[in-house]
Amino acid sequence: MNLTLKIWRQKDASSKGQMVNYKVNDISEHMSFLEMMDVLNEQLVNSGEEPVAFDHDCREGICGMCSMYINGEAHGPDRGVTTCQLHMRMFKDGDTITIEPFRAAAFPVIKDLVVDRMAFERIQQAGGYISVNTSGNTQDANSIPISKHAADEAMDAATCIGCGACVATCKNSSAMLFVGAKVSQYALLPQGQVEASDRVLNMVAQMDLEGFGNCTNTGACEVECPKGISLENIARMNRELMKASFK
Amino acid sequence: MSGFFKSSIGRKVAMALSALFLMFFLIIHLSVNITSVFSKDIFNVASHFMGTNWLIQFIMQPVLIFGVVYHFVMGFVLELKNRKAVGITYAKNNGAANSTWMSRNMIYSGAFILIFLVIHFLDFWIPEVKYKYIDVIPEDPNRYYEELVHKFVPIWRVALYTIGFIFLSLHLMHGFKSAFQSIGIPSIRKKIFQTCGKIFAIVVPLGFIVIALFHHFNNH
């Protein structure tokens, strides 16, 4: 198929960017979206132009690196997939595809489609962990009984890959689905109870410090999340914060 | 505790609590007003009670005014903060693909409700304050029904109130379930909560519209 691509080009963090049009021809419907981008970049390099910078790593939906806003949706029009898992069969011959970086004041553009998502790392560092003595006395995880329901819910929350699609999709650039998932994956397990209060207080404080917006429960994040992280995690985080603040 | 209400989640919970209080008030308001459709005397008795009971007048009414003002002011403050958090907007954004129109436009439905409330205050609340506290006219327990009916004689006012309540319905369509989600109610995902939200968002504004239409046509 032959396509027109409207892509955000921005030289560096301090430059002003703009949308630039490109044509790509003979794209197979079996290609992934990133393979289509590879074709475009090969074309640009061969013609002596600067290739489009975009984040990618595992290309199998695990690492959370790819981060494009395609035709007005984070990770494109398909559901439950990252950009690397999006296939060109989702588009038609002759389509114009708009490709932009994830937008949020807390995710500044580094170059073209690459954004700085270190804000997520700083939120994680504020409390997204459990402290374990690893000096040889570590208790076997299986010796602590955990209900199937709690284990399943914690595992569901832990599938968050931190790609930032929730922030990119949210009309308020809120990071509450991400933080909710990270708080929940520990709050649901006995191992996470010891630091539960400090965790939620510190992670929410860091989230606010990073300049993310306020959640208004539109539910867009849940729909666009490639891992299907539920809004229930935000409700749980709210409960955890209330519990920690008023005890 | 003060730290909680300074956090983004705390502000969200405070918004939800004020919304729940306002929704409770809507039920009370509708319960009193709907009696006017069935009985002039019951409406007069209920309105006289609401207008003269000290607990309602001097405790509940100030709390209500605070709730209304807080909900509107905080709504606009949060909207400004959120716009700052967004930064550069998308060249193409398909919001309809993942969320409802009502959820994305709460600020606009809220702004229209605010305009409606100003008109409503000018129509009913300000004359009531003038009657009781400025002109200090002796209380007539039978005046309320006539005052209500008189207001809905002009068709333009009925049309204005109908539009106001349509915006209220749109606001509640998202606001009801959103308030429960914000205070962390875990069962919000269940069908029953969403159904209750839809019923509330339709029945309550519709009740007020029916009252306005009834009195307009009943007096022609």
Image: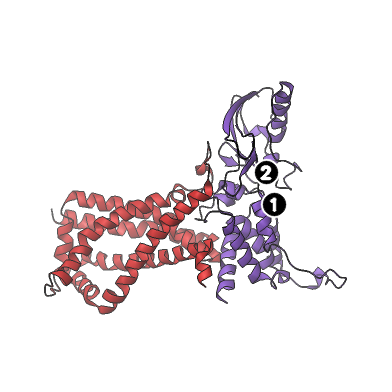
Chain colours: A purple, B red
Q: Which residue extends farthest top?
A: A47
Same-chain status of marks 1 and 2: yes
Residue A200 x %, y %: 62, 66
| Quadrant position of the C terminus of chain A in the picture | bottom right
Q: Which residue extends farthest bottom?
A: B54
On screen, residue B94 above or below B65: above
User: What is the total number of numbered labels drawn onto the structure image?
Assistant: 2
Q: Residue at x 74, y 26 (%)?
A: A42
Determine crowd level at label 1: few under 14, some 14-19, many 20+ residues with C-alpha closer than 10 A.
Answer: some
Q: Chain of mark 2?
A: A
- Left or right of A136? Residue A176 is left
Picture quadrant of residue A153: bottom right
Picture quadrant of residue A30: top right
- Contact between labelled residues 2 and 1, with CB atoms less than 8 Å apart: yes
Question: Badge 2 is on which residue?
Answer: A82
| Quadrant position of the N terminus of chain A in the picture | top right
**Residue A28 visible from this viewpoint:** no
Residue B32 x %, y %: 26, 68
Q: Secondary structure at mark 1?
A: loop
**Residue A143 visible from this viewpoint:** yes
- Left or right of B166? Residue A55 is right
Question: Badge 1 is on which residue?
Answer: A161
On screen, residue B173 above or below A41: below
Q: Secondary structure at mark 2?
A: loop
Q: Residue at x 17, y 58 (%)?
A: B151
